[in-house]
Amino acid sequence: MTRRATTNEGRKLTVSFQLIAALKHRGCVKVEDPRVSKYEVFSHPDYDGRFYYIGRYGALRSGPTVRGSIGLSDGFKTTIINAWRASQKLPLIKIDSFESRSLSFVIHKDILTNTP
């Protein structure tokens, strides 16, 4: 059995929404870059010149520019999302590549039991 996860306001917890919340939880701030329209751009104060790029469907890239960035693994996404979810007292999740491409995030019965 699966169910769609929602926030208290009733919004769906999409992968991109959770990634943005997780990056903000880690201290990243949104950067307004007029050259980048396909991704939301975040930077961390401790990593000068390094940016995170989040796509509409949960793609996560890191690098100095979009063109010079590399895609980050589902394992990394799971780790940072679960750190945020633990701080919000939400059940932990496991991302696989099929789910990370979907519009809405689905929580499965195989919820992770250990915190990252």
Image (cartoon, rainbow, N blue to C red):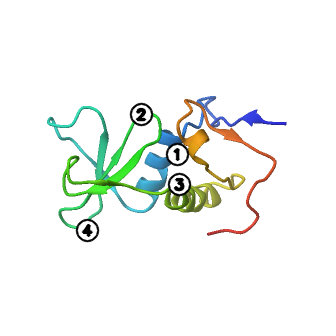
Image position of 17 (left or right of 34): right
Q: Which of marks 4 and 3 is nearer the N terminus?
A: 4
The residue at 56%/45% (across/down) is 97
- Point out the image quarter for the N terminus: top right
Are the two marked residues, 4 and 3, in contact with CB atoms closer than 8 angstroms? no
Rendered position, 63 above or below 99: below
Determine which of the numbered discs, if any, sits on residue 47 in the image.
4
Element at badge 1?
helix
Q: Report the disc number at residue 18.
A: 1
Q: What is the secondary structure assignment of the residue under circle 4?
A: loop
Q: Which residue sits furthest left? A: 35
Camera-nearest residue between 66 and 28: 66
Could you tell me how far apart the alpha carbons at marks 3 and 1 are, in whole angstroms? 13 Å
Front position in the image: 39 or 83: 39
Q: Name the residue under label 2.
A: 56
Task: State the residue at coordinates (41%, 33%).
Answer: 56
Residue 26 picture location, percent across and down: 43, 62
The answer to whether residue 16 is above or below residue 47 is: above
Q: Are marks 2 and 3 in contact (CB under 8 Å)?
A: no
- Image side of residue 37 versus residue 53, left or right: left
What distance separates the C-alpha of mark 4 from that of mark 1? 21 Å
